[in-house]
Image (spheres, rainbow, N blue to C red):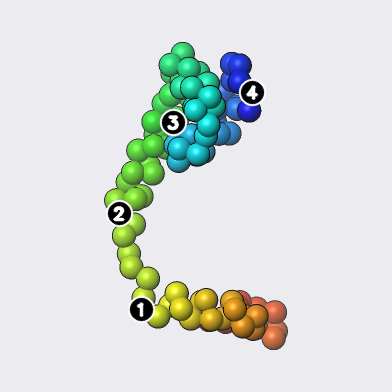
Amino acid sequence: MGEAEMDCGAVIEEMYTFLDGELTASQRITITSHLEGCIDCHEVIDFHAELKLVIAQRCTEQVPTGLEERIRQTLASGDHHDPAGGIPRL
């Protein structure tokens, strides 16, 4: 991503890294500058920011007790494929 002006495609490509706060200060300023002058990109970013909030608020289901440990053990053992080549066994 360049330090100068960005086009809409580059902004959309970096959308999630922007929303997740994973950009350098310079990159963030470049995208913010683009968003101030581009209503189309601004609307896309706003929509996805709101979508992330809704997902974070509503997706609070807990992992069943013991499932994480069974997954870790299975992956650590290296024996996680069905001999017939099907779905991994847990």
Q: How far apart are labels 4 and 1 at the CA level?
A: 46 Å
Q: Amino acid at mark 4?
A: Gly
Spatial CA distance of label 3 from label 1 is 37 Å
Reply above or below: 57 against 20: below
Name the residue: 44% across, 31% down.
45
Q: Amino acid at mark 1?
A: Thr
Asked if residue 40 shows in the view, the reply is: no
Residue contact between numbered discs 3 and 2, judged by CB atoms under 8 Å: no
Residue position for label 3: 45
Q: Are marks 3 and 1 in contact (CB under 8 Å)?
A: no
Looking at the image, the residue that sits furthest to the right is 84
In space, the residues marked 3 and 2 are separated at their CA atoms by: 20 Å
Secondary structure beneath label 4: loop
Nearer the viewer's eye, disc 3 or disc 4?
4
Q: Position of residue 52 (x, y in %)?
A: 38, 44
Q: Hey, which quadrant is residue 85 in on the image?
A: bottom right
Give the percent coordinates (x, y) of residue 74: 56, 81
* Residue ID for mark 4: 2
Three-letter amino acid code of the residue under disc 2? Arg
Residue identifier under label 2: 58
Indicate which label's residue lies in the foreground, 4 or 1.
4
